[in-house]
Amino acid sequence: MPEKVYIFDTTLRDGEQTPGASLNVDEKLQIARHLELLNVDVIEAGFPFASRGDFEAVKAVAREIRGCQIAGLARAFKQDIDAAWEAIKEATQPRIHTFISTSDIHLKHQMKKSRQEVLEMAVAAVQHAARYTANVEFSAMDASRSDLAYVAQVFTAVIDAGAKTVNFPDTVGYAIPEEFGAKIKYLMEHIPNIHQAVISVHCHNDLGLAVANTLAAIMNGARQAEVTINGLGERAGNASLEEVVMALTTRKDLFDFYTDIVTQYIYPTSRLTSKLTGVVVQPNKAIVGANAFAHESGIHQDGVLKEASTFEIMTPTAVGIKKSTLPLGKLSGRHAFKKKLQEMGYYLADEELNRVFVQFKDLADRKKTVFDEDLVSLVETEVIYKSVPEHFRLVDLVVLTGTMVKPSATVKMEVGGELKSHSAFGDGPIDATYKVITHLAGSKCRLLKFAVSSITGGTEALGEVSVRLEDAGHIITGQGVDPDIVTASARAYINGLNRLHFVKKLGPKRGKPEKL
């Protein structure tokens, strides 16, 4: 009889620790809704004590999401646990997730505490959390580099104190699959009360082994996998939800386990998360990368045309990648456009649909063929990226460039409802445009990253620009799309300025949490 593996998604907590991937409340809610559609068992919504903004985001997720357990992270301190409970108490199934280091490396150099002191802190934290809820998880940070006998002692004690889940993290991505599986087996055999709790694993990808370590742990007794969408997370990231789930789903001949994940929502959730965090999914990324179901080799194409299973071990539709033959162009009507978007999984309100349709018509006038990827980008730009108020709005842009003139730009934009315009020279048309926008916005932000990509092939392709901006310790990502790359660059910069303006209004952070 197959056993269930619980999926604990920490995209909104550990995934947000990806540099530059900070999310506001509305963006966290958008991802949380998709995680609920995916049917994950637990959503770790954030670290409530870290900042007022994170507290409010966790609270908002706990209030709205009803189909999943909602977890809040807390260090083994009373004030952290109290804050976590206040944030998650309105959830239908709240979980407090508390943690402390157990490795001698951390105890000696970071915490400067003895093993006995840490053991007592762990027990006290779990006992305090258990006063609020019976659903308490305890994590031994840097467990994979800890003395196993000591970890077993700590886990035994915290289970007696009320922990229902004990998490064994490979915090620094140090473990090798065979070794990691053996550690889980040891714990299963040396924790006398392990039948009262679930063993969980939280694997980082520093050596590219996070998914392999997670699967090895499951084979040896772990029944909860802590994962993120697209493998986001600190440093090299975490075990990828889509890879762990589809490995268990595809290789049932080896894994006598199942999850409750609705796999058809994997790709839409991956795409949404990528856009909101600004972290691009590499083309050759397993399951959700642009090339995951692409076949360029003639031999592969011939095989797939005759029988898909010759070169595909899973179908694109199984993970929510839908192929359509319905072409759209400048003569297409609103009804056909709406139907096409619904086939792609987008159900927009009338106002949103009208806004996207206007942009589609404008694009269709300039492009011979509008591809599915173009439509996805339009929806994301007009709906998803307008999740923050438009304090800055581009009204008009004129650039002059060439081999015999010094590049210049004239920009007209609204700033807080006031129409302003300015002109400037630059080293190139984009540099000139950014100088003008910076002047009009009165911004002191630094441009950390500027990236340009083509949504589809050809010279008429829709260009997509991503920028990363930093101001007063806040790092955000802005996105813009347009067939004209200078205009796309202007839209990306203004989108980033709007997001910075919104984040700065929330007030200063108290610092990021420690990491698992």
Image (tube, rainbow, N blue to C red):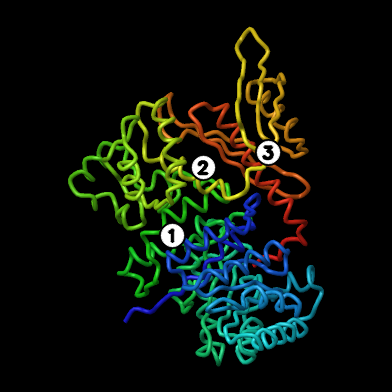
Q: Residue furthest left?
A: 306
Residue 376: which quarter of the image? Answer: top left
Nearer the observer: mark 3 or 2; the answer is 3
Image location (x, y in percent) of residue 2: 34, 78
Give the residue type that dot 1 points to.
Answer: Glu
Crowding around mark 3 (Cα neighbors within 10 Å: few <14, some 14 to 19, many 20+) is: few
Q: Which residue is mark 2?
A: 381
Q: Are marks 3 and 2 in contact (CB under 8 Å)?
A: no
Nearer the observer: mark 1 or 3; the answer is 3
Crowding around mark 1 (Cα neighbors within 10 Å: few <14, some 14 to 19, many 20+) is: many
**First in sequence: mark 1 or mark 3?**
1
Q: Which residue is mark 1?
A: 243
Check the image and report above or below for 108 versus 28. Answer: below
Image location (x, y in percent) of residue 448: 69, 39
Q: Residue furthest right?
A: 112
Front one among 492 and 134: 492
Give the residue type that dot 2 points to.
Answer: Thr
